[in-house]
């Protein structure tokens, strides 16, 4: 019996389910940046994924923790932006006539 608990997303990285589908980029948002988010991020980074962290969609156990991780830890390996900037990057530019 396997008693080890893992986040479902980590299982996807470990079994290369995402790579098999041609996924190369991962966008991360969630709770507890110092545990869940950081573990998921490291797992994706170690497997070569390009990671974008949505700093206004990530929380920590404290405001200090969230700010510290988003300003000092995540930028070491990841692209850290807010959700509005991310959505603007996905939206084709409008051409003014």
Image (tube, rainbow, N blue to C red):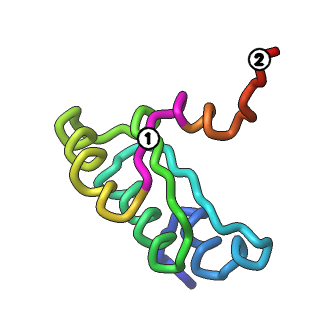
Residue 14 screen position, x and y as percent: 58, 80
Location of the N terminus by quadrant is: bottom right
Residue 13 screen position, x and y as percent: 59, 74
The answer to which of marks 2 and 1 sits earlier in the sequence is: 1
Left/right placement of residue 3 relative to residue 96 reads left
Instruction: Tell me which segment is drawn in magenta.
Output: 79-85
Residue 19 screen position, x and y as percent: 70, 76
- Counting other residues with Cα less than 10 Å from the Cα at mark 1, is it few (<14), some (14-19), or many (20 or more)? some
Mark 2 or 1, closer to the camera: 2
Q: Circle 1 sits on which residue? A: 81
Q: Circle 2 sits on which residue? A: 96
| Tag 1 secondary structure | strand
Q: Residue at x 75, y 35 (%)?
A: 92
Residue 73 screen position, x and y as percent: 25, 57
Q: Is residue 77 above or below residue 60?
A: below
- Counting other residues with Cα less than 10 Å from the Cα at mark 2, is it few (<14), some (14-19), or many (20 or more)? few
Name the residue at the top extreme.
Answer: 97
Q: Residue at x 45, y 49 (%)?
A: 53
């Amino acid at each position: 019996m396997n008693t080890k608990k893992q986040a479902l997303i980590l299982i996807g990285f470990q079994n290369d389910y995402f790579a098999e589908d041609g996924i190369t980029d991962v966008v991360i948002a969630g709770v507890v940046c110092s545990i869940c988010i950081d573990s998921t991020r490291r797992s994706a980074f170690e497997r070569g994924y390009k990671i974008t962290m949505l700093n206004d969609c990530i929380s920590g156990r404290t405001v200090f923790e969230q700010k510290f991780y988003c300003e000092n830890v995540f930028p070491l390996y990841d692209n850290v932006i807010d959700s509005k900037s991310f959505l603007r990057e996905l939206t084709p530019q409008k051409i003014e006539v």
